[in-house]
Every structure is written in structure tokens, then in C-alpha cells.
Amino acid sequence: MIKKILIANRGEIALRIIRACNELGIKTVSIFSESDELSLHTRFSNEAICIGPSISSKSYLNIPSIISAAELTNCDAIHPGYGFLSENSEFAKICIENSMIFIGPHPDTIDLMGDKSEARKTVKKLGLSIIPGSEDIIKEIDDCRSIAHEIGYPVMIKASSGGGGKGLRIVHSESELENSFNSAQSEAKASFNDDRVYLEKFIEEPRHIEIQIISDSKGNTISLGERECSIQRRNQKIIEESPSIAVDENLRKKMSKVAIKIANSVNYLGVGTIEFLLDKYNNFYFMEMNTRVQVEHPVTEMVTGIDIIKTQIRCHGNYTHSDWMYKIKPRGHSIECRITAEDPYNNFMPSPGKVTSLHLPSGMGVRFDTHLFAGYEIPPFYDSMICKLIVHDRTRIEAINKMKCALKEVVIEGVKTIIPYQLFILNNKDFINGNINTNFLNKLNHLGSKNESNR
């Protein structure tokens, strides 16, 4: 039985984990950098400890400092959240070596599936469809150029560790390749302390569909259905929904069966996500597995009624799935908007600073996950996402309308946010009709004037 968890993260996801632990009767310890001293996750945990300066490499990516904090506060488990060290197998190994439970899969599983390149090899051995690309990590630009020439442009250079669009570059011609290769490596190193990258064919205009799986302590794996994550800006998801309008019950069963097969093949434990690209003929290709909780997990919670974080923690005890969980089907429709501190009228420039006024939307089927408060100073050192707005209603159209109403109710003064851009997307006829793919936002190049949009 886990008694105390150190949360190796910050912001919204740290608060989300704290709430889950409180409901489970588990004590929590928050870590924070110097710039996060007044963040809400430090206030609502049982204990909080500073682990270093604002820069991530010296704080949230500093493994010795995190382990020391866990030992100092007598924690018996560490939850990595998402991002930072959540898919770092070395961190997971060190947790175990120091007699602490890592709230995630076994380090060997992370090596196989959290490492995107190794995951491709594993899935290919199972006889499943993967996107054409490099067989292994690419270390030299000449090798990258050779493989790109073989599979044809456009291609994607992707970080082997992590996710969230970090360390990812789409390359349309050989003239762009070397610069993209170098910048992908640099960003991957800065984001995940791992500069390894690989190459795969860029499939134009597919849908991005992911399957949420949970494997219990006995190795039983269930699927909680799919999420549609096709609305992406610069390879970063900004609107997600469940279920997908493109996935019927038959296709859902097929994709879930493949996802469960993949998870079982690597003896998976806990929460994970299998990501696929779905073409217009309903052919789906394995893209990667995220061996952690996803930013967009709330939409699945809304349509299934399953608390994914609490279930994830329970999986590291003597927990087995209840019989009814194998029969779960989505109820209604849920949409999530990731709200970032960026100025959509100024090329999405980051907008850190003090939140001078804050009003959060509410009502039936409205959920707002955030660490913001009036007076909070948004630091410039981390990801620009500051909150997530999630809604649930009977149908997709009703969920879209509810989301628009909720977004208009949000007041975040003192910084710029992308709310006007999200309203612009939600009012688009093609989005409303479900005619979307991963290239959707590249075709929406006009936001309109400030007078045309809501704040």
C-alpha cells in the first residue's frame, strides 16, 4: 500500500495528482523550482521542497535532487506526471534502486515503448502496420539524408524520448533536412535530456487517433476507447475529443484489440496510450506509445466515468479491473481545449506574466483543470499551457456549443491566451462537420480581427 507519493512535476498535472492522492488517502510531497515557490501545487500538498533554480535541467530534470527530496521526506513512490522525466527509463530504474515505486511501467517497458524508435521495432515484430521510416536511431545527417531519399519526402524527424511535439520537425525537401535534423536534436536534448532522433514518412492529412489503455497488477489490459487529437498547431495538440466522429464501433474494437495486443506484448503496467494515424480509407498505422498519462486524459474520464489517475496509482498495488470495466462504452461526447499563454494575434508569441484577474466557467458538464489564481506569475521557463477546459454533453454538436459558451465565460487578464483562436476553430464549418485531419490548422490562416473574436 502506497503511503506517500512525491510528485515529480509542476502546474496543472501536479494538482491533478494531489487531488487523486487525497481521495485515496495518500500523502503527497511537491517539488518546485525557485520560480514555482508560490505555485498552487506547493500549497495543496502535505509537504513541499525546493529542488533548484528555474531552468528545468537544474530542477524538474535533476534526477539526483528529486531522489534526494523523496528520501528526505520518506516517500515510498514517485509520480512523474507527463513531460519532464515521465518517459525516462533511467529515472524509473533509479527510483526502483532506491526502493521507491515508480508510478509508471517497468523501466524495460519504457525502453521498448517509451523510446519511440524501439517501439516501432517491437510493433513491427508483432506483424502490425507501422509508418515507413528508419529502423533505428539516426546519428549522422548522411544517414538521415539517405533514408529520406529512400522513403520519399515529406518526412518527419522525431525525438526518440518524450512527446508533446518537442523535438519534432516536418521536412518537405532535402534543402530543409540538415537544419531540421540539428534543431530537432537540440530541442530533444533541452526537453528530455536525450538528443536521439529517428525518421519516418510523413503521411499527409491523416487523423490522429489514440487508444487509452490501462493494465492492472495482474496483467489484464482494458481499452477505454479512442480520442481524436487531429487539431494540432506545430505538432502540438490544442483541441481533443472523445469519441472520434471517424471511428465507429467496429473500428473501435479493431483499434482497441491492436492496442491491447501491443500492451500485453511488453507486460505493460498502469496507464498508457497507443497512438495511430488513420487514413481516409480507415487504415490505421501504429505511430508511438506514450508510457505515461496524457494531457488529454480528461475527455476519456468524462465519457467513461473512470478516474484515470486514481486507477493508475491503484495499479501499483494489488488492484485488478472490475468485470464491468471490460464493457465500458463512451457515453455522450467530450471536448478539451488546451489554453496556453500565447498571443494568437502576434504569431503566438509566449505571454508570461502576472494574472491580474481570473474568472473560471462552471455549470453542468464543465470542468476546468488549472493551477492559475489571481496574482499568479506565469514563469517564462516552461511549457505555455496554463489550463485545460473540458466539457461533456449528449452529442458532439451540443459539446461544441457548450465549449464555445464556456470559453466565452473565461476571464484571464494580465496575459494573452489562445482562446480567440480556439473559438475561431470551433466556429469553422469543417470542424463542426467533423471534416478534420492533422493538417487542418495549416489551412486556417486567418483568425480575423480582435473585434470579430471573443477575448
Image (cartoon, rainbow, N blue to C red):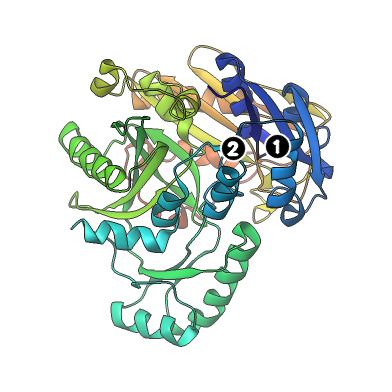
What residue type is disc 1 on?
A: Ala
Per the rendering, the mark at residue 100 is 2
Q: Nearer the viewer, residue 273 or 99?
A: 99
**What's the residue at 53%, 22% (across, down)?**
1
What residue type is disc 2 on?
A: Met
**Where 40 sits versus 32, above or below?**
above
User: Marks 2 and 1, how far apart in space?
Assistant: 9 Å
Residue 42 place in picture, x, y as percent = 77, 29
Dots 2, 1 in contact, CB < 8 A: yes
> 332 left or right of 127?
right
> 82 left or right of 322?
right
Q: Nearer the viewer, residue 154 or 193?
A: 193
**Where 216 sits versus 380, above or below?**
above
Residue marked by disc 1: 70
Per the rendering, the mark at residue 139 is none
For disc 2, the neighbor class at 10 Å (few under 14, some 14 to 19, many from 20) is many
Residue 394 place in picture, x, y as percent = 35, 17
**What's the residue at 19%, 52% (across, down)?**
283
From where the camera sits, is residue 447 visible? no
At numbered mark 2, what does the secondary structure look like: helix, strand or loop?
loop
**What's the residue at 74%, 22% (across, down)?**
46
Residue 39 place in picture, x, y as percent = 77, 32
Mark before the other along the chain sequence, 2 or 1: 1
